[in-house]
Image (tube, grey):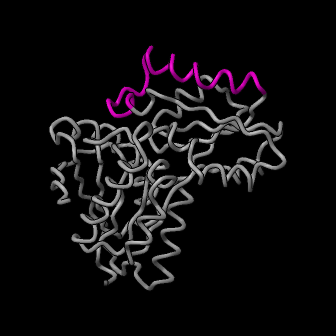
Amino acid sequence: MTKTNPIGVFDSGVGGLSVLREIRNALPHEDLRYVADSGAAPYGDQSSEFIISRAQAVVEFFVKAQVKAIVVACNTATAVAVQSLRSRCTIAIVAIEPAVKPAAERTRSGVIGILATNQTLASERFAHLTQEYGKDVKILAQPCPGLVEQVERASLDGPRTEALIAQYVVPLLEQGADTLVLGCTHYPFLISAIRAVAGPAVSIMDPAAAVARELHRRLKSNNLLSCRNTCGTEQFWTSGSPTQVQPVVEALWGSAVEVHALPAPRY
């Protein structure tokens, strides 16, 4: 493993691009490799066994690509699969999870709302977060079926998206939530629409920047930070249809990219 090896980042689909964006900002000289497991998306309503299998297949792809670190840019994959991944892989794995602790510290009303997938909210890992940091606050867990699919279509606004957001956010506000946690990496792409419903007084928390800082810390401690002065590159793969996924990635990433077909895993 050398300082010039790339970093692997993956999500069930394109949502992890919100994390990749923060990583690029924090680590401008690193080469980044992104996998959107769009052929299996969304993870949120899949079985634990399925999610673990898919996550392991992506990690095996990254191992073959000789990445120096892996970022699990998917709350559901973290909740369900990260322990299994770490037990099987010697490469450093940095994972995202809902920002329950900072939300509990920030709330003024004592009520926080967690927007996430069914699998994330039902996981033991999320239960541990709420038990550890939710003793002095009321935590409202809100599953958000349909939002991932809207982002996967790059439908970031419009009547359907706005109706879904109102359906999920308004009940939290009515119960006194003054802090909302984005517990899925797809949701930061909807932050403008969420803000329109929640209003300016409500804090909206996205843990992606904290993930980028932790990745920086881990690379530095392992003496693996790139020493180059040139800008790093990005490469993209998907298990879905590259011709369908590429325009969505370009819309969310904000520039022209080439999306490659992810090789099928060998079981």
Query: Number of labelled discs?
Result: 0
Identify the residue at horizontal 44%, vertical 26% (top origin): 146
Identify the residue at horizontal 53%, vertical 44% (top origin): 120
Q: Which residue occupies the foreground of this view, 38 or 178?
A: 38
Q: Dividing the picture into quarters, in which one does residue 176 lie?
A: top right
Reply above or below: 164 against 52: above
Q: Which residue occupies the foreground of this view, 50 or 28?
A: 50
Q: Does 161 lie within the magenta span?
A: yes
Identify the residue at horizontal 58%, vertical 41% (top origin): 121
Q: Dividing the picture into quarters, in which one does residue 267 lie?
A: bottom left
Identify the residue at horizontal 45%, vertical 14% (top origin): 159
Q: Where is residue 134 in the image (x, y as percent from the top left)?
A: 76, 48
Provide the major secondary structure of the magenta segment.
Answer: helix
Reply above or below: 83 against 131: below
Q: Which residue occupies the foreground of this view, 250 or 175?
A: 175
Q: Where is residue 244 in the image (x, y as percent from the top left)?
A: 19, 35
Range covered by the magenta-colored residues: 149-175
